[in-house]
Image: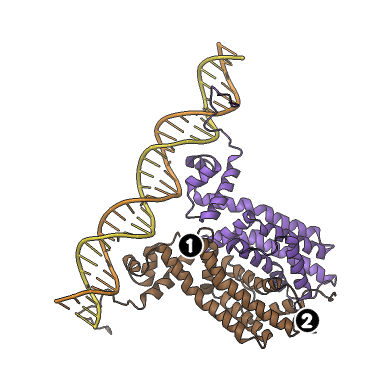
Chain colours: A brown, B purple, C orange, D yellow
DNA sequence: TGCAACTAACTGACCAGTCAGTTATAAACG
DNA sequence: CGTTTATAACTGACTGGTCAGTTAGTTGCA
C-alpha cells in the first residue's frame, strides 16, 4: 500500500568509494573476531560490508593486508589518547591516573575495543611483526605514560617509591584480567559499572592488602 | 668406519602405540602455537611427532578432536595443583599465597605452559565451549583457592577486609600482564628471576602504592 | 560518452580426512 | 628354536571440498 511500486527499481549497488574502506574494516573486525582470522571467509567479510568479494580487493591487496590495515586503523586512536592524558595531567598526576584507569575500564569493557588485542594475541605466533607493532604503538606508549605519571606522583610525595615496572603491572594487570574474564572466558561480571571496578582497584592498589603497614 | 654396515637396516618405523598419543599432543601444541590452529597442517604435526598423517588419525578422530584432547591433557595438572595448595595451606594462608604466587610466576614464564591459555584466547571466539571448559577447570578453581586463602588471612587479622574479587584480580593480574608482555608481545623481561617478580609484586600488593595510609 | 566502481563466475592451490596396501611384532606351531 | 600366521600399527597416494585471489563483463554516475 504505502510503498508505491517504483517503475525504475533502486540500483543493485551504489558507488561509494569514500565510505567503503571503513565499512570493510568494521566487517573484517567482526568476522575475524567471531571466526578467527583463518576461518573467516573474504566472501563473508564482503557481504557484511555490503558489497561483493571482488569489490573488497579493489581496496585491499590481500587478506593479510586487510588484517594489517585493520590493526593499524583501530590502534592509532588509543595510543593517541594515552599520550594526551599523560602530558596534560603532569601537574595533578593522581587525578590523571584516575582518569586513565576509568578510560581503561570503559574501553576494556567494550567487546569491540577488546577485539583487537584479542586478535593480536591469537595471531602473535604467526605474525610477530603485528605483535611488535602493537607493542611499540600501544603498550610501550601506555607504559611510558603511566611511568611518567607515577614518577611525578612520587616526586610530589603522593606515592611511595617503588619499582616503576612493578607499579605499572599492578595498575594495568587487574583490568587485563577482568577483560579476559569477561570477553574471552565468557564470565559474568558481578558488577557491570566501570566506576565500581576503578574504585575497588584504587583502594587495593593504593592502600594494599596488608592489615598493618610494615616498615 | 665405526658404523658396521648392518645387513638388515633398521626398520622404517616402529610400533609404539603407548607413546604415540602424548607425542602427538606435544607436536600439536608446538605447531598450533607457532602457526595457529587453522594454519597448522596435520601433515606437519604428524612429521613432528615422527609418524605419517594417516597415523595421527588412528589416535584422534579429527583436527578438532586433537585440539580438545590437547587442552584437556595440558590443563588437568594445573587445576589439580592449585586446589592442593589451597587446601593444604589453610593454617598459614600467607605462606600458601606466597607459594602460589611463586608457582604462578614460574609457570607463566615457561612458554610451553603459557601456550595453552594463549591458544584458548585465540580460539575463544570460534570454540566457546573450550573457553568455558578452561574457565571452569582452571580459572574458577584457582579463583576459589585464592579467595579461600585470602578469607583465611582476613580471619586471622593478617589482611584487610577488601572485596575478594578485587583482591584476586590484584593478585593474578600483574602476572598475566607480565606473561603477555613476554610471550605475546615479545618484550624483553628486565629481570628474569621469578623470585624478584614475586618480591616486587608482594611489596606493592600488600603495602600499596600510597605514601601515607588514609583511613 | 567515458570510466571508475562494482559484480559474478571462474581458477588454481591447498589440505583435512580416507583407504588400500605394507610392515613390524607377537603368538602359535612344528 | 626357526617358521608360519595373524593382526595391530603404520604409510602414502588420493579425493572432494573449500576459499583466496583473478578477470571479463556490467552498471551507476559525472
Question: Which quadrant of the figure contains the N terminus of chain A?
Answer: bottom left
Residue B33 appears at what percent x and percent y?
55, 55
Total marks in image: 2
Q: Which chain carries label 1?
A: A
Residue drawn where x is 61% and y is 52% of the image: B72
Q: Which of marks 2 and 1 is in front?
A: 2
Residue placed under numbered mark 1 in the picture: A36
Q: What element carries label 1?
A: loop
**Residue B62 vertical placement versus A28 (above, below):** above
Residue drawn where x is 60% and y is 56% of the image: B116
Number of residues whose C-alpha sits closer than 10 Å to that of mark 2, classed few (under 14), some (14–19) or many (20 or more): some
User: Any mark on residue B30, and which?
Assistant: none
Number of residues whose C-alpha sits closer than 10 Å to that of mark 1, classed few (under 14), some (14–19) or many (20 or more): many
Q: Mark 2 lies on which chain?
A: B
Cα–Cα span, label 2 and label 1: 46 Å
**Residue A191 vertical placement versus B3 (above, below):** below
Residue D12 appears at what percent x and percent y?
43, 37
Q: In this view, does A20 lie to the left or right of B101?
A: left
Question: Which quadrant of the figure contains the C terminus of chain A?
Answer: bottom right
> Where is residue B102, by image quadrant?
bottom right
> Where is residue A200, by image quadrant?
bottom right
- Mark 2 touches mark 1? (CB < 8 Å): no
User: Between residues A89 and A11, which one lies in front from this camera angle?
Assistant: A89
User: Between residues A147 and A212, which one lies in front from this camera angle?
Assistant: A147
> Where is residue B23, by image quadrant?
top right
Q: What element carries label 2?
A: loop
Residue B4 appears at what percent x and percent y?
58, 24
Are both tags, 2 and 1, on one chain?
Answer: no
User: Between residues B115 and B83, which one lies in front from this camera angle?
Assistant: B115
User: Any mark on residue B211, and which?
Assistant: 2
Residue A100 appears at what percent x and percent y?
62, 81
Outermost residue toward the front?
B1
Amino acid at each position: 500500500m504505502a510503498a508505491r511500486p517504483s517503475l525504475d527499481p533502486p540500483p543493485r549497488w551504489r558507488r561509494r568509494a569514500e565510505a567503503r574502506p571503513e565499512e570493510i574494516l568494521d566487517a573484517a573486525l567482526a568476522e575475524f573476531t567471531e571466526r578467527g582470522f583463518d576461518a573467516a571467509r573474504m566472501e563473508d567479510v564482503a557481504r557484511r560490508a555490503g558489497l561483493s568479494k571482488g569489490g573488497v580487493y579493489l581496496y585491499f591487496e590481500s587478506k593479510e593486508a586487510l588484517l594489517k590495515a585493520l590493526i593499524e586503523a583501530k590502534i592509532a586512536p588509543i595510543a593517541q589518547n594515552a599520550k594526551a592524558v599523560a602530558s596534560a595531567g603532569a601537574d595533578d598526576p593522581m587525578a590523571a591516573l584516575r582518569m586513565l584507569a576509568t578510560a581503561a575500564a570503559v574501553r576494556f569493557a567494550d567487546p569491540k575495543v577488546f577485539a583487537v588485542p584479542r586478535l593480536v594475541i591469537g595471531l602473535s605466533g604467526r605474525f610477530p611483526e603485528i605483535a611488535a607493532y602493537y607493542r611499540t604503538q600501544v603498550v610501550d606508549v601506555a607504559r611510558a605514560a603511566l611511568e611518567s605519571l607515577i614518577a611525578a606522583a612520587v616526586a610530589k610525595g603522593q606515592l611511595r617509591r617503588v619499582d616503576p615496572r612493578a607499579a605499572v603491572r599492578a595498575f594495568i594487570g587487574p583490568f587485563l584480567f577482568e577483560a579476559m574474564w569477561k570477553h574471552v572466558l565468557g564470565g559474568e561480571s558481578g558488577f557491570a559499572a566501570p566506576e565500581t571496578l576503578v574504585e575497588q582497584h584504587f583502594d587495593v592498589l593504593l592502600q594494599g592488602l596488608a592489615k598493618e603497614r610494615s616498615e
